[in-house]
Amino acid sequence: MPTAECAVAELAKMIDHSLLHPTMTDAAVREGCELSARHQVATACVKPYSVPLAVGVCAVAAFPHGNSTTEGKVRESLELVGAGATEIDVVVNPGKVLGGEWGYVEDEIGTVNQAVVGAGAILKVIFENDYLDDAHIVRLCEICSRCHVAFVKTSTGYGFVKQSNGFYSYAGATDHHLKLMRESCDPSVQIKAAGGVRRLDDALRVRALGVTRIGASATEAILAEAKTRLSR
């Protein structure tokens, strides 16, 4: 295989193709799964009820707000693994994080991870960085390292914060937060960047910061740009 094709295939294997918008129909999810299979990305990342539609699937749990009980997160995660998911992206409880209830947070992450790994899948823990200060992110990285989770992840893509102008927006995967997460996690814990990775340069930039997985809805555009540029 030519070097350019190898590079594009390697990039594709970093991508969880995001099919998480609440308005997506089954037809749109199937189309996204076909795109995922065609480009041989890491996974199609789908809403819980969509798991049976997908192959090579990452499913989200307690998404997007993370406010389910610990028992609910375990139950949902195991149901999704039973339906065929091999990776689970679960959202932390942001209120518990912001309230400094670290014992609760660590017990929950450890309990969910143990259940998911025991069922034969891997866990990614979504922080929702837009809600957090650096100190919260560092503490979460330390907890996830102790719990031996597979990945930590920046954002859901739906963590909108009210700005001074009254509008809601989010920053997603910033360079600052990605560097902080890589520095604060054990080397065995991988980093997933989600939110704002829309172009090839975005993907290459976050990869250079130590990211090994990307959550993206612009998968086709990123890979098309990679094929064009790397073939020159």
Image (cartoon, grey):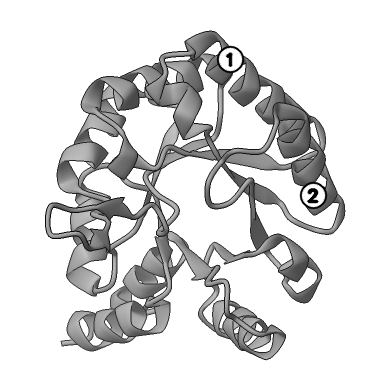
Q: Is residue 103 left or right of residue 213?
A: right
* Mark 2 secondary-structure assignment: helix
Q: Nearer the viewer, residue 141 or 38?
A: 141
In this rendering, the answer to whether 52 lies above or below 94 is below
Q: Residue at x 13, y 52 (%)?
A: 164
Mark 1 surroundings: few (<14), some (14-19) or many (≥20) residues within 10 A: some
Q: Which residue is drawn at 32% across and 46% down?
A: 211
Q: Nearer the viewer, residue 117 or 59?
A: 59
Q: Which corner quadrant holds the C terminus?
A: bottom left
| CB contact under 8 Å: marks 1 and 2 | no
**In front: mark 1 or mark 2?**
1
Q: Where is residue 100 in the image (x, y as percent from the top left)?
A: 41, 14
* Mark 1 secondary-structure assignment: helix
Q: Position of residue 148 (x, y in %)?
A: 56, 22
Mark 2 surroundings: few (<14), some (14-19) or many (≥20) residues within 10 A: many
In this rendering, the answer to whether 67 lies above or below 6 is above
Q: Is residue 186 visible?
A: no
Q: Where is residue 158 in the image (x, y as percent from the top left)?
A: 42, 58
Q: Residue 155 carries which label?
A: none
Q: Which residue is drawn at 27% across and 60% down?
A: 168
In this rendering, the answer to whether 119 lies above or below 79 is above
Q: In this view, does 128 lie to the left or right of 39?
A: left
What amino acid is found at the position of numbered circle 1 in the picture? Answer: Tyr
Q: Which mark is residue 104?
A: 1
Q: How many marks?
A: 2
Residue sitting farthest toward the top: 103
* First-in-chain label (1 vs 2): 2
In this rendering, the answer to whether 64 lies above or below 217 is above
Q: Residue at x 76, y 37 (%)?
A: 72
Residue that badge 2 annotates: 81
Query: How much space separates mark 1 and mark 2, taking CA atoms?
Result: 24 Å
Q: Is residue 155 left or right of residue 120?
A: left
